[in-house]
Amino acid sequence: MKKIVELHDGSTLEVGLTGNPSGKVIMLPVAKKSVYGQEADSLKLWGVDPELGKNFVEGLSDTFQVMYFDYEGHLFEHPQPDSLTPENMAQDLLRIADEMNVRKFSYYGYSWLALVGLQLAIKTNRLESLIMGGYPPYEGPYKEMLAVTEKTYEQAINHQSIPEYPHEQHTSPEEIDWNNIQVKIDPSQTKQFFTMYQSLMDFDDKKIQDRLNFPKLAFAGEKDTIVYGENFGSVTVDIIGLLQKNVKQLQSFGWDVEILKGNDMDHTKAMQPTSVLPLIKPWLMKHS
């Protein structure tokens, strides 16, 4: 089943519901649409599965019902520069569940979409379980990400007149000088994430842990540390470091914590279906 759902800003998003009708429902806002041809080849160079959404949905739908959509893709097509707040994002996700006639559900999100899941969890009693990948649920890097998104937004404003960054001259990410790369992107696309982190500056993830009374899993790749150059605020977003530092604290709050091993298991690799499904599917089956 597919439906077109209207979100808080009036834009519309296609949402699918598929899978085992007797299984519990998992919300997958990470379900990017498949791409093919040259675009797919480019994604593969970056270690990204060009059929990421499809493979997640198919990988889970034999056991569960999967409610899937591409929230990030939608926000790049329909930016919300001034209204991408935790309240509005939670409202969007609950509206989606309502439109799909789903009352209770589990949630899996990765990176900033994991952060969204944590916000959703404290704003509703409808979550059955929560999986956060690539973003620590305790002592999260909110200030660092505010610095990164602010710098990205500033660059987007300042570089509106420069030509596109010549990606085609580079065959792989390793050849790009990340300290000198210039952002050429619609400022409203970047501002929405700056707005999101700005609105989270008073949020304390240490104080909400006792409100998360359901099964919950946090994971990250063992090489998930991103060092940003001066252009992006000269900050380090140490996802794995924060997760490892707080393992015992998280476990005391009832979190399961997993570290995906591998010398190449960085932020990108640890979000691919081949990395994630072998971890989250058995975990969801255990907690269904």
Image: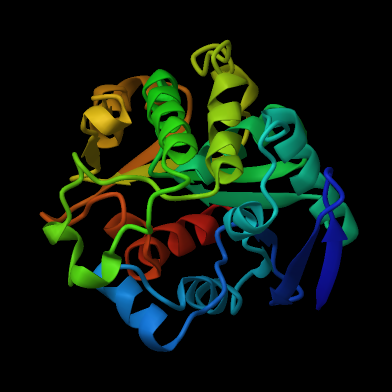
Residue 256, located in which quarter of the rendered image? top left
Q: Nearer the viewer, residue 107 or 199?
A: 199
Q: Is residue 181 visible?
A: yes
* Residue 182 left/right relative to 282: left
Residue depicted at x 53% and y 30%? 194
The total number of labels drawn is: 0
Residue 6, located in which quarter of the rendered image? bottom right
Q: Nearer the viewer, residue 203 or 212?
A: 203
Query: Looking at the image, is 195 positioned above or below residue 15?
Result: above
* Residue 92 left/right relative to 288: right
Q: Where does residue 276 sit, x and y in percent of width and height? A: 38, 61
Where does the C terminus fall, quadrant-wise? bottom right
Q: Where does residue 135 sit, x and y in percent of width and height? A: 41, 37
Query: Looking at the image, is 274 positioned above or below residue 185?
Result: below
Q: Nearer the viewer, residue 81 or 41?
A: 81
Where does the N terminus fall, quadrant-wise? bottom right
Furthest residue in direction bottom, as rendered: 37
* Residue 70 left/right relative to 40: right
Q: Where does residue 155 sit, x and y in percent of width and height? A: 41, 36
Q: Nearer the viewer, residue 243 or 49?
A: 49
Q: Is residue 101 visible?
A: no
Q: Where does residue 251 sit, x and y in percent of width and height? A: 39, 28
Residue depicted at x 34% and y 72%? 43
Residue depicted at x 88% and y 53%? 98
Display coloring: rainbow
Residue depicted at x 47% and y 45%? 160
